[in-house]
């Protein structure tokens, strides 16, 4: 190739590579341990631009340099669009920090204190924080999620898991998704699960479907183990050809089959009106729960409590029938 042609091609390729590099996300890795920071850097350097901090003061200093803004994030969080990730304005478009990955111990403060300080200015959907911790305690993880941490990763962890958790934060949830999540978080199945985590699993593990009146949702004795959440409308529960119950919004269908993948559907469910149902895919949910052990423990605890409640109700009904039978026979 002619020398001038090579030079032009190199300039074009150089511009292309610079453009490609410029779109990489910028991640702040914060940990008091230089060894941990080096490990994180080796995990992330191929896919992200990495900056470092060794304590809480450095985190706030880096934020001032890399993602200083006029706090519109937090102001927006107090308005009608609180569930929607705020758009960056001129004060934070020129600079940009996309995600923080921080250890729990930061020398001068801990991650809880830093997170509370950050959340005074930065919305969690605008600046996600992933906590790296060696503690796999469910209550501590749930507490961290409640104060504004977006996700938790438990040490030691492989590179692939860290990258997966970062990728999760790249997809902001819509306001509609967050509103739905707030409703579903109140279902007994999800009690104790932070709304942000409910929002993520709804976004990635299932979909909302529309059913016409009389349409089958699931059928007795089939192997379908998905979980169904009735959002709008009404459904009939049919056992051996007879209607035995109604399902109203917002109730779940198939919790037991969702846990016990070997069992068959115990009843048929069909819509008695046009209905909207969220279908949670069991395989995708199992994968999510394998990664999120604290959330898995919370949901399994909820299922055990629900089973216990059903057993108590069944025992009460049996005892009532027994007393009725005794009265009938004695009369």
Image (cartoon, grey):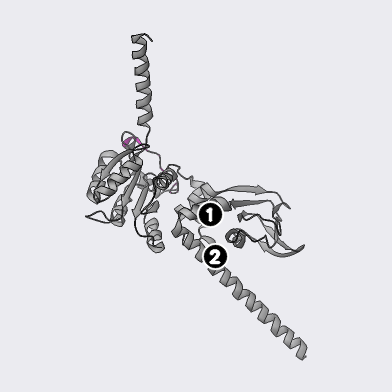
Question: In this picture, is 243 found above or below 330?
Answer: above
> In the rendered image, which residue does mark 1 sit on?
286
Secondary structure category for the residue under label 2: helix
Which residue is located at x 38 percent, y 23 percent? 16
Q: Looking at the image, can residue 245 be seen?
A: yes
Q: Position of residue 202 (x, y in %)?
A: 53, 50
The first of marks 1 and 2 along the sequence is 1
Which residue is located at x 39 percent, y 56 percent? 145
User: Badge 2 local density, few (<14 within 10 Å), some, or many (20+)?
Assistant: some
Q: Position of residue 35 (x, y in %)?
A: 26, 48
Q: Position of residue 105 (x, y in %)?
A: 27, 56
> In the rendered image, which residue does mark 2 sit on?
303
Does the magenta run of residues contain 190?
A: no
Q: Position of residue 197 (x, y in %)?
A: 46, 53
Of 76 and 5, which appears nearest the observer?
5
- Per the rendered image, the range of residues in magenta is 81-91
Estimate the spatial distance between the alpha carbons at disc 1 and disc 2, rounded to whole Å: 15 Å
Q: Is residue 11 left or right of residue 255?
A: left
Secondary structure category for the residue under label 1: helix
Q: Main secondary structure of the magenta part?
A: loop
State which quarter of the image contains the C terminus: bottom right
User: Badge 1 local density, few (<14 within 10 Å), some, or many (20+)?
Assistant: some
Q: Is residue 119 left or right of residue 237?
A: left
């Amino acid at each position: 190739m002619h020398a001038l042609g090579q030079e032009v091609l190199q300039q074009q390729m150089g511009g292309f590579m610079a453009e490609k590099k410029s779109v990489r996300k910028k991640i702040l890795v914060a940990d008091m341990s230089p060894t941990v920071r080096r490990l994180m850097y080796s995990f992330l350097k191929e896919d992200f631009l990495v900056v470092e901090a060794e304590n809480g003061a450095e985190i706030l200093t880096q934020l001032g340099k890399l993602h200083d803004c006029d706090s519109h994030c937090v102001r927006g969080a107090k308005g009608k669009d609180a569930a929607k990730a705020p758009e960056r304005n001129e004060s934070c478009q020129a600079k940009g920090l996309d995600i923080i990955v921080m250890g729990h111990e930061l020398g001068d403060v801990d991650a809880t204190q830093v997170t509370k300080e950050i959340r005074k200015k930065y919305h969690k959907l605008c600046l996600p924080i992933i906590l790296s911790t060696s503690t796999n305690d469910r209550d501590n993880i749930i507490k961290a999620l409640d104060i504004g941490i977006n996700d938790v990763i438990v040490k030691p962890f492989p590179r692939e898991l860290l990258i997966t958790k970062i990728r999760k934060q790249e997809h902001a949830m819509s306001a509609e998704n967050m509103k739905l999540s707030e409703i579903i978080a109140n279902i007994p199945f999800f009690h104790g699960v932070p709304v942000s985590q409910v929002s993520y699993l709804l976004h990635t593990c299932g979909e909302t479907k529309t059913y016409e009146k009389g349409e089958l949702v699931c059928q007795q004795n089939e192997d379908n183990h998905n979980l169904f959440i009735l959002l709008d409308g009404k459904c009939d529960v049919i056992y051996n050809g007879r209607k035995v119950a109604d399902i109203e919004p917002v109730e779940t269908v198939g919790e037991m089959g969702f846990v016990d993948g070997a069992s068959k559907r115990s009843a048929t469910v069909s819509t008695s009106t046009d209905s909207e149902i969220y279908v949670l895919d069991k395989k995708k949910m199992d994968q999510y729960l394998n990664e999120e052990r604290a959330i898995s423990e919370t949901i399994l605890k909820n299922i055990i409590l629900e089973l216990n409640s059903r057993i108590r109700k069944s025992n009460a009904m049996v005892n009532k029938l027994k007393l009725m039978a005794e009265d009938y026979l004695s009369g």
